[in-house]
């Protein structure tokens, strides 16, 4: 894989990005742009998925058969590819979610310590 | 934007079936991204941005479309082939744009790969290819021979009578066969012809597991005097002398005067042992008093190991030795040797040295091509920078540059195959016949092609890696801002020049050592004067000359006519000439019955009266043989100086008597009449041998007098007509007598040093190749360096540097490149030339003269190579360069 500096930020998120996309598709089929927009909105505008990560991830998920895609026409007449979560994707999502929950629980325990005196 | 972003993308190629799927996917991805783009812009416009701002913002967000596509492609998998083809196409396109670079690189690698492929073909044929027999790994040689004979005959023989006993009882080796080889005269198929002949047990063919192509091989029982009038001929002989006649079976021919019927023709390529062209059954007479050592070959019976066979042979020989103890304290070697080792002989070290030398040449070629690529990469920085900026990842660029160098190497390999074909032919033609065994197994095959292909890929990767890494590492911004111009010096260049200088020096020193050794060999005083001596070798068939008297008679008649030839100064005859590969050695009995030293043997040549004068061997004491010494007068002998000193250190040997047999009869005693110098018998790398000379007309044993060399000393001007006259004389005396050879003695001297000469020649050629490549490399780097430093040098000149000063500057620069290489090369040579030690004669592997000489030559060549660019540097016009 290429080591391009512009990618490094998202590479950290690689495993997570797949999970986020699956999670997003749980609200219904969407095209790539829609997915990106939704991730941004749902992350309080903090997460901006770059196209350079989004499309590779979508194609990767398609290959793993966790999502399927079909061509359709958007409201303004654009030919767009719509991605849909598959049952296998649902299952994977459940796995990822429980993993994530355990991890975030663990991290919360570690990171969110009660404030100490020096912090006051 | 799209087009220039992917300059290496195929332009809608439909030629490859596997493109179809990816092309469709590719268009789909395009659509998808375009839709994304449009929606993003539309959203921004809807939020109130101006269309231009929206477009610019989205573009910024989007980054590099080519890159997006590329990484998405990678998730598709199965791309490597397409990408490889892309890279190959790209590489060949860019090579076509740089024809000079391509030609030089391809030719350089063609030489390196070609030479290596040629050498590998030889190595494969001799060392790697299985022997062309059935299940050859089960074939072994049984050896039971005294060590001192091992030196003479090679380590693979057994006494014929012992062979017969062992054959009758062995349970581990079946069938057991033996053979010996000699040149024999073929009559009845055109001109009389001397042929490499093998006398072999009838079972030899069964042992090897080979069948006749036509007719049959020998049958068991065809080895008695009553049944052995059969002969099997080789395929080449069948074609050359019998026109591949299918009715040849049953034809009668004469071998050494014996009439034989052809019963079989062997398949092409079968010429065991050595280069045999014709096979006759070997008849061993168990009652004969003489016995001879000859190779014994057997096939291990199934489930028997070599160790078991050896145990059986040891047990057998122990019983034999108890029954018939060896004379004196001779040490016998008993062993079971794979037939392969016996066939290959001692060529292995030579081959390894040749292979090592061509390997070095290839490395130098790679270094040169690396250098070329570095320079090319330097001029391509701009192009590479643009491509990196447009989204080509570093690994992609690297891969592409490597592909380019492998493409160059493969093209070089293609040309190199031509070089290899020619090289193998040249090598086989130039190699002395005794050096390379199995020549019929040496040819380019699939295995060799595969190896050549591998060599190409490896050579491509070796020569491409450094340039690829160094140029792909360069910062994009640097590349673009410098707009293609480069820094003046790239240290990697220096590394390659240093490396190839070191390698070339190593080879040059090796070649120098061999050449000096060869010169020493040629300078050896042989004890006789070979110049202006012509030799005629004659084998008198005992079927035609049945008595010693008839042999003496025909030789006498020939000698008289030879002496009368115009231009002949002296003439005589000898049975076994020096420097032929046959010698008669043995012991003798002194009159006082003093025991001889253990293992002591002397040469026993039989000569006629004028031999010493003809050969230029000085007489030290007493007299030479005289015409008055004859068959009926007192038996006379002459001894060589070494022998005289050994047995009569404080007195004159003249008048002493000795006999050639163990239990002499009165008629066997010979009186020593003179002492001559010791001479070199076997070759200049052997010590001079002690000898007892007998007078030919006084010797009656047919085996000592049926092989004769007429030796003639001529005036320098007369050698050609004398050679012709000699042939006529022999034919006038006996029209049916074949002449084995008419040869100047100097040719025989050359023949015995043919092996070292070949080795010297081959390594010499490789080292010259290496030297030229290194010179090209040095020239290339400096020429490039001068071009790159044009501005700097121009400024120097503008500031007052003189032409001489600038030339010196560049020359010093070249010395700085070369000198570390010389030092490394010298150090490497000190270690590596030790492998040459066994090939060196009177020269040590660390011979200072050779080392200094080679270093001097390389330095001179380097300065010469540097001088052209240096002069150009000196003539730079600052006005032009600095504009």
Image: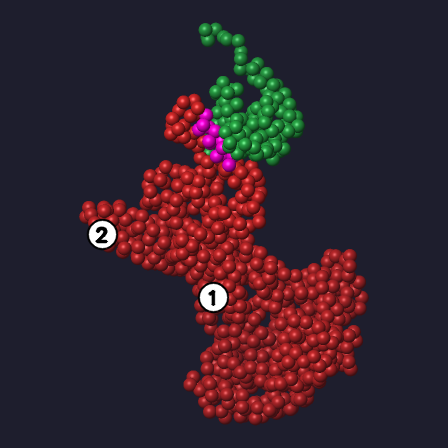
Chain colours: A green, B red
Which residue is more in the foreground, B296 or A77? Answer: A77
Q: Secondary structure at mark 2?
A: loop
Mark earlier in primary sequence (2, 1): 1
Direction from residue B268 to residue B383 in the image, left or right: left
Where is B423 relative to B806, above or below?
A: below
Which residue is more in the foreground, B271 or B328? Answer: B271
Looking at the rendered image, the disc whose residue lies closer to the viewer, 2 or 1, is: 2
Determine the residue positioned at 39% across, 49% down.
B376
Determine the residue positioned at 25% across, 49% down.
B881
Report the magenta stretch's main SS.
Answer: helix
* Residue B354 x, y percent position in the rendering: 52, 60
From which residue to which does the magenta span run? Answer: B31-43
* Residue A51 x, y percent position in the rendering: 49, 31
- In the rendered image, which residue does mark 1 sit on? B761
Which residue is more in the foreground, B767 or B617? Answer: B767
Task: Please give the chain letter of the residue carrying mark 2.
Answer: B
Task: Please give the chain letter of the residue carrying mark 1.
Answer: B
- In the rendered image, which residue does mark 2 sit on? B877
């Amino acid at each position: 894989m290429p080591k391009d500096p512009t990618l490094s930020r998202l590479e950290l998120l690689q495993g997570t990005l797949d999970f986020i996309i699956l999670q997003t598709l749980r609200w219904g089929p969407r095209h790539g742009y829609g997915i990106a927009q939704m991730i941004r909105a749902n992350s309080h505008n903090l997460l901006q998925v770059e196209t350079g990560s989004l499309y590779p991830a979508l194609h990767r998920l398609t290959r793993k058969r966790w999502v399927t895609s079909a061509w359709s026409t958007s409201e303004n007449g654009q030919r767009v590819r719509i991605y849909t979560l598959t049952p296998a994707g649902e299952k994977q999502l459940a796995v990822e979610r429980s993993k994530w929950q355990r991890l975030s629980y663990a991290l919360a325990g570690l990171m969110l310590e009660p404030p100490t005196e020096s912090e006051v | 934007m799209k087009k220039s972003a992917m300059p290496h993308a195929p332009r809608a190629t439909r030629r490859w079936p596997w493109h179809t799927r990816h092309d469709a996917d590719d268009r789909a991805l395009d659509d998808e991204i375009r839709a994304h783009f449009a929606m993003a812009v539309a959203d921004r416009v809807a939020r109130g941005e101006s269309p231009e701002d929206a477009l610019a913002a989205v573009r910024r967000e989007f980054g590099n479309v080519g890159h997006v596509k590329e990484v998405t492609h990678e998730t598709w998998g199965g791309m490597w082939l397409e990408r490889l083809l892309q890279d190959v196409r790209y590489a060949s396109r860019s090579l076509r744009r740089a024809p000079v670079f391509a030609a030089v690189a391809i030719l350089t690698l063609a030489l390196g790969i070609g030479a290596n492929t040629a050498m590998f073909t030889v190595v494969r044929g001799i060392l790697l290819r299985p022997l062309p027999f059935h299940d050859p790994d089960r074939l072994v040689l049984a050896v039971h021979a005294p060590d001192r004979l091992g030196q003479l005959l090679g380590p693979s023989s057994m006494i014929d009578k012992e062979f017969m006993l062992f054959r009758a009882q062995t349970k581990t080796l079946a069938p057991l066969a033996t053979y010996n080889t000699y040149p024999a005269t073929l009559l009845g198929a055109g001109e009389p012809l001397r042929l490499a002949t093998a006398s072999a047990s009838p079972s030899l063919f069964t042992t090897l597991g080979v069948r006749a192509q036509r007719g049959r091989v020998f049958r068991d029982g065809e080895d008695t005097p009553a049944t052995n009038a059969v002969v099997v001929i080789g395929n080449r002989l069948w074609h050359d002398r019998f026109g591949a006649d299918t009715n040849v079976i049953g034809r009668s021919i004469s071998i050494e005067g014996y009439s034989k019927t052809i019963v079989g023709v062997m398949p092409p390529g079968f010429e065991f042992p050595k280069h045999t062209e014709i096979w006759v059954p070997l008849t061993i007479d168990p009652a004969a008093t003489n016995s001879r050592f000859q190779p014994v070959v057997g096939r291990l019976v199934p489930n028997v190991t070599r160790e078991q066979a050896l145990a059986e042979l040891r047990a057998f020989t122990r019983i034999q030795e108890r029954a018939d103890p060896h004379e004196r304290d001779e040490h016998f070697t008993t062993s079971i040797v794979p037939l392969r080792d016996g066939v290959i002989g001692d060529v292995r070290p030579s081959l390894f040295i040749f292979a090592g030398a061509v390997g070095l040449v290839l490395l130098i070629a790679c270094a040169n091509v690396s250098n070329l690529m570095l320079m090319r990469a330097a001029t391509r920085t701009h192009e590479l920078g643009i491509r990196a900026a447009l989204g080509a990842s570093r690994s992609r660029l690297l891969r592409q540059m490597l592909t380019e160098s492998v493409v160059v190497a493969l093209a070089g390999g293609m040309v190199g195959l031509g070089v290899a074909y020619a090289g193998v032919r040249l090598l086989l033609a130039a190699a002395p016949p005794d050096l390379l065994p199995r020549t019929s197994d040496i040819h380019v095959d699939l295995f060799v092609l595969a190896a050549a292909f591998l060599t190409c890929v490896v050579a491509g990767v070796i020569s491409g890696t450094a340039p690829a890494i160094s140029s792909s590492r360069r910062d994009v911004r640097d590349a673009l801002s410098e707009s293609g111009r480069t820094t003046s010096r790239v240290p990697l260049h220096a590394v390659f020049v240093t490396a190839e200088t070191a390698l070339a020096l190593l080879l040059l020193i090796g070649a120098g050592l061999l050449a000096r050794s060869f010169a020493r060999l040629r300078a050896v005083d042989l004890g006789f004067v070979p110049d202006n001596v012509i030799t005629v070798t004659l084998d008198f068939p005992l079927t035609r000359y049945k008595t010693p008297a008839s042999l003496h008679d025909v030789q006498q008649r020939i000698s008289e006519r030879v002496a009368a030839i115009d231009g002949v100064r002296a003439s005589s005859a000898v049975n076994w000439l020096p420097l032929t590969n046959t010698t008669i050695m043995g012991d003798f009995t002194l009159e006082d019955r003093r025991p001889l030293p253990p293992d002591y043997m002397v040469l026993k040549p039989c000569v006629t009266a004028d031999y010493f004068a003809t050969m230029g061997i000085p007489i030290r004491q007493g007299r030479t043989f005289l015409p008055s010494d004859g068959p009926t007068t007192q038996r006379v002998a002459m001894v060589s100086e070494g022998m005289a000193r050994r047995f009569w250190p404080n007195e004159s040997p003249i008048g002493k008597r000795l006999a050639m047999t163990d239990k002499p009869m009165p008629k066997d005693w010979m009186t020593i009449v003179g002492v001559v110098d010791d001479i070199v018998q076997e070759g200049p790398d052997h010590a001079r041998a002690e000898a007892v000379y007998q007078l030919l007309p006084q010797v009656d044993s047919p085996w000592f007098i049926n092989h004769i060399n007429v030796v003639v000393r001529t005036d320098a001007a007369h050698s050609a007509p004398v050679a012709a006259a000699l042939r006529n004389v022999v034919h006038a005396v006996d029209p049916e007598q074949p002449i084995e050879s008419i040869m100047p003695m100097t040719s025989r001297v050359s023949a015995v040093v043919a092996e070292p000469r070949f080795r010297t020649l081959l390594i010499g050629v490789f080292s010259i190749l290496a030297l030229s490549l290194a010179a090209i490399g040095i020239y290339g780097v400096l020429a490039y360096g001068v071009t790159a430093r044009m501005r700097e040098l121009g400024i120097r000149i503008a500031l007052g540097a003189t032409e001489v000063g600038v030339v010196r500057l560049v020359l010093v620069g070249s010395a700085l490149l070369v000198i570390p290489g010389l030092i490394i090369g010298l150090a490497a040579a000190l270690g590596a030339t030790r492998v040459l030690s066994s090939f060196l004669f009177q020269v040590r592997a660390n011979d200072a003269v050779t080392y200094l000489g080679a270093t001097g030559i390389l330095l001179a060549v380097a300065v010469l190579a540097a001088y052209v660019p240096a002069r150009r540097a000196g003539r730079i016009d600052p006005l032009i360069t600095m504009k």
